[in-house]
Image (tube, rainbow, N blue to C red):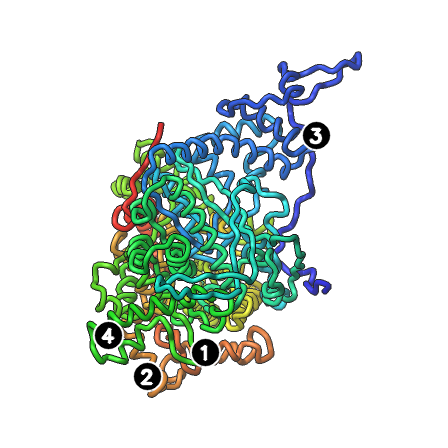
Amino acid sequence: MTSTIDPKTIGRPIRPRRHVRTLTGYLPETDAAGKEQWPRGEEEVWRAGIRGLDKTVDDITKSVVNHVQTSLARQAYNIDDLGAYQAAALSVRDNLLVNWNETQLNYTKKNPKRAYYLSLEFLMGRTLDNALLNLGLKDEYKDGVQKLGFSIEDILDKERDAALGNGGLGRLAACYLDSGSSTELPLWGYGLRYKYGIFQQLISPEGNQLEAPDPWLDNQNPWELPRLDVTYEIRFYGRSERSHDGSGRAVWAGGQEVVAVAYDVMIPGYGTKTTNNLRLWESRSKRGFDLNSFNAGNYEGAVESSNSADAITSVLYPNDHTSFGKELRLKQQYFWTAASLADIMRRFKNQNKPLAQFPDFVAIQLNDTHPTLAIPELMRILIDEEDLTWDQAWTIVTNTFFYTNHTVLPEALEKWPVPLLEHVLPRHLQIIYDINLFFLQAVEKKYPGDRERLARMSLIEEGQPKQVRMAHLAAIGSRKVNGVAELHSDLVRTTILKDFVEFEGLSKYSNVTNGITPRRWLDQCNPELSALITKTLAVDKNVWLKDLKLLKGLIPHAEDADFRKAWAAIKQRNKERLAAHVQSTLGLTVRTDAMFDVQIKRIHEYKRQTLNILGVIHRYLTLKVMTPEEKAKVNPRVVFFAGKAAPAYYIAKLTIRLIVNVAKVINGDPDTKDYLQLYFLPDYSVSLAEVLIPASDISQHISTAGTEASGTSNMKFCLNGGLLLGTVDGANIEIAEEVGESNVFFFGHLTPAVEDLRYQHLYHPVPIEEKCPALANVLNQISSGLFGNDDIYEPLLNTIRQNDYYLLSDDFDSYIAALAMVDEAYQDKEEWIKKSINTTANMGKFSSDRAILEYAESFWNIEPTPFK
Ligand code: 26W
């Protein structure tokens, strides 16, 4: 199929020309007599390729040059930025490897209890800068590559994001790994090595999202170590025969066998030598290869295209919050959990301990329900392969697993059709039925005759077809269950798992509020602010970056005018950095003397980007009827959106289209363009977030109350001194508790009102014109063709005019009022900067170090295991 992408499509960065240079100082000059003259006695290095210890600038240049010549097999006079990046990365990797080896040796010697974080997504972003920071070699490498004629910024910019995730859940996993190593915990990650990460988002001239594959491994990945010696065979399909000896055992045979190959990614800790491991599995056919091609035209189809072995780890599913039965996704989940458990079991068995002690040495965290098949898989191993009884096995299982829920939205709760499970994993379905039987017997015993309760709690949902409720399985198979912010954990306890709390007791159901790593989300993305904080607190940054509550020391400085000036100047430079980025990648000019207002996250109805764009249109319409005198008082605003829509999510894609087309009108209107600019930045990624977040004055987290489990970008903005405009939802609430409600702009209905309002929409609807005239006007302007003359937006507008499940019409007026309060507050620049400083100063709670230590202490029972 040929590509139909319009050449005017934005989203592909403008590529600078390849600039090839010679590594300064590492090639001989030819003198007048034609003789080679080596600079600074480097001939020996050149000839022998001696690898230095990489601690001093000289060591570093030697090691980089060595990698150019050996690992890359390239000539020193023919290196572009990409080559320099690769060589620098390999050189840094050598350093990581030393620590990584020592870490593993330390664990083998001390044999502590370990925790394993099973996540289908790890949104790692770029690695080089983080590795340099954590190794404490940033300055040395900067000087080293400069000596070779390169700039570290250009080199860092050559790295592709490892985008093996959709959004919050995947980035949280990445932050937790960073914190695990930084707090010296024996914590490993297990995931899948997708050949294609989250799709690349392109925006067509009409404003449509197009998806292109993300071949992130094309340039090779210096950060992974293939472990061709660590492999497991994973079975699918076949038949499961129960034995008739009363043991409960079964023999599962036949079907398809696929090989799992390990790839290890080193996870360095900040300011420690601990370098943990992230093990990603690749699927390979036992026989050979089967090549698939992917194209931009039919991404979903391509995902589904093949049932072969290597298709299993080909593509990350680009969905969050939609659960759907797809055989390939089920195979991904089983492939990954089975390989991970086999690996964990092999490591445990090396110790020659009785299996009953498994939970004393192993804790397994289930990142949402995606790895829940690990529960029946461990039962299968213990019963069928290790000859334990059902009760022995169940005791081990329920002391090993821990389950974190990340959403209460019904459409995101995973269910697998029974016929599909029976076909792909016949033995596991038997085990699930057995778990269910014993479980329901116990429920029946406690609540005799309560059939409705049994139906609600059953692992099997009746229907055509019957489905397995994975959240129920995860809950009953785990030792602890938690949500990711206080409100969310309450909702888990009182809604989706209410019956389970009643049955099993409250103490099993708790909360761990999410966190973010301040290394990436402050020091790396906002180096100037980090330096100012270090200077002001007068403590080493190694100290405050690992004890984030120390930021409170900034509070008194909010009263110091010079400090405020320095603070504001950094925000301004971060805006200019963002503007330069937009200019160089998209060719668009962004004004920087305005308030920067940012909403960046997956595009979803519950996150209400639609509310935001409708608010922008409202502002535009208001500006259009203002007199010049009135306009002169208006505070200019630049609104940024970024985020991907799931490829099949029609309404979310329409929202993008609306934003892009509103931007065209607003940015081109001479009446308003000095007061309002609007940008949709394509292809949102971790790296783009790192540029956007430090530049924001205000960010929007405006989900319908009770729908956003936590949010984590809200924490990132506030840590960087951006204020928060949001609903009383998720972690917004705890952020406000920490930074003070006067520093947060809240609006909208609260969670308890949501159900009633939805009921009213259904049974006592009030026309929008009556209920919210301002919103009705905005909708009518869109319908009348202000942003394009066809009916294209009607399905989106109808979600509000009918039903309005996400309550835009209920929250619109208070949203507009909150935006006005933001404007008013921004007029007083000094007060605004004080708010900004106080916000940063009070964000200590949200370090992922705090969160990971809560998991370690309250759930996993593992301890820091440092070494010298
Ligand atoms: C089955 C499809 C599917 C895939 C992923 C359903 C649901 C998910 C995730 C649970 C979606 C997700 O990323 N949730 C986000 O998790 C973050 C980390 O806890 C929270 O901060 C966000 O509020 C939550 O939406």
Instruction: Check if mark 4's residue and mark 2's residue have beta carbons within 8 Å.
Output: no
Q: Which residue is mark 4?
A: 444
Q: Residue 72's spot in the image, x, y percent? A: 65, 34
Q: Label 3 is placed on what type of residue? A: Gln
Q: Residue 791's quadrant in the figure?
A: bottom right
Q: Label 4 is placed on what type of residue? A: Glu
Which label belongs to residue 75? 3
Q: Residue 734's spot in the image, x, y percent? A: 28, 56
Q: Neighbour class for label 2 at 10 Å: few (<14), some, many (≥20)?
A: few
Q: Which residue is mark 2?
A: 760
Which label belongs to residue 465? 1
Q: Could you tell me how far apart the alpha carbons at marks 3 and 2 are, in whole angstroms?
A: 72 Å
Q: Is residue 406 above or below residue 146?
A: below
For marks 3 and 2 on the same chain, the one whose residue lies earlier in the sequence:
3
Pick the quarter of the image with the N terminus.
bottom right
Q: Residue at x 63, y 44 (%)?
A: 219
